[in-house]
Image (spheres, grey):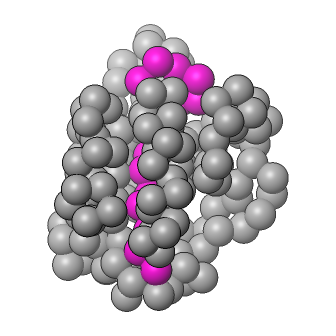
Amino acid sequence: MTTLNPGDPAPPFELQDAEGNQWRLEDLAGKKVILYFYPADDTPGCTAESCDFRDSYKAFVDANVEVLGVSPQGAASHQRFVEKCELNFPLLVDEDLSGARAYGALKEKPEEWDGMKLHIKRSTFVIDEQGRIEQAIYGVKVAGHVDALRESLGV
């Protein structure tokens, strides 16, 4: 599987959010982007992580940093999750796992687990204003993650 490192060009992506808006990395040139991959909507760890981003979103926006969450659930699932948790940033749909694959944010699990072999590995990428990887964090631990990002970015 692909592993990205600081300084690498960020893989381009083109994904839709829950409302059908198209998001492309090239359209975000000139601002930093936090692209975080999470396994599933409305699960305990993913909810805690997303709510931490929600609570810090204004600080990120004030520092010209866009926050985008990515998971394989469809638009309807994302909409329910956004409404339930009052999320204030876009969640992108990656049903075919193309975004996760490009960023190396996949792991294998036994198919008996739920009928799927590939799953999202909780991962976060900070992409700089020129479209290069500034930070690549694989196997994210939720507790304290967003605070550590804020500190590293001076936000």
The answer to which image quadrant residue 48 occupies is top left
Residue at position x 30%, y 55% in the image:
150
Residue at position x 60%, y 74% in the image:
24
Residue 1 in view, yes or no: no
Q: Which residues are magenta?
A: 31-45
Rendered location of residue 121, percent (x, y): 34, 38
Rendered location of residue 122, percent (x, y): 35, 38
Residue at position x 25%, y 65% in the image:
154
Rendered location of residue 12, percent (x, y): 48, 75
Of residue 122 and residue 51, the one placed in the foreground of this image is 51
Of residue 18 and residue 82, the one placed in the foreground of this image is 82
Of residue 91 and residue 153, the one placed in the foreground of this image is 153
Q: Is residue 22 left or right of residue 30?
A: right
Residue at position x 35%, y 24% in the image:
109
Q: Where 39 falls versus 101 (above or below)?
A: above
Whether residue 23 appears in magenta in the rendering, the answer is no
Residue 29 in view, yes or no: yes
* The residue positioned farthest toward the top in the image shown: 112
The answer to which image quadrant residue 119 occupies is top left
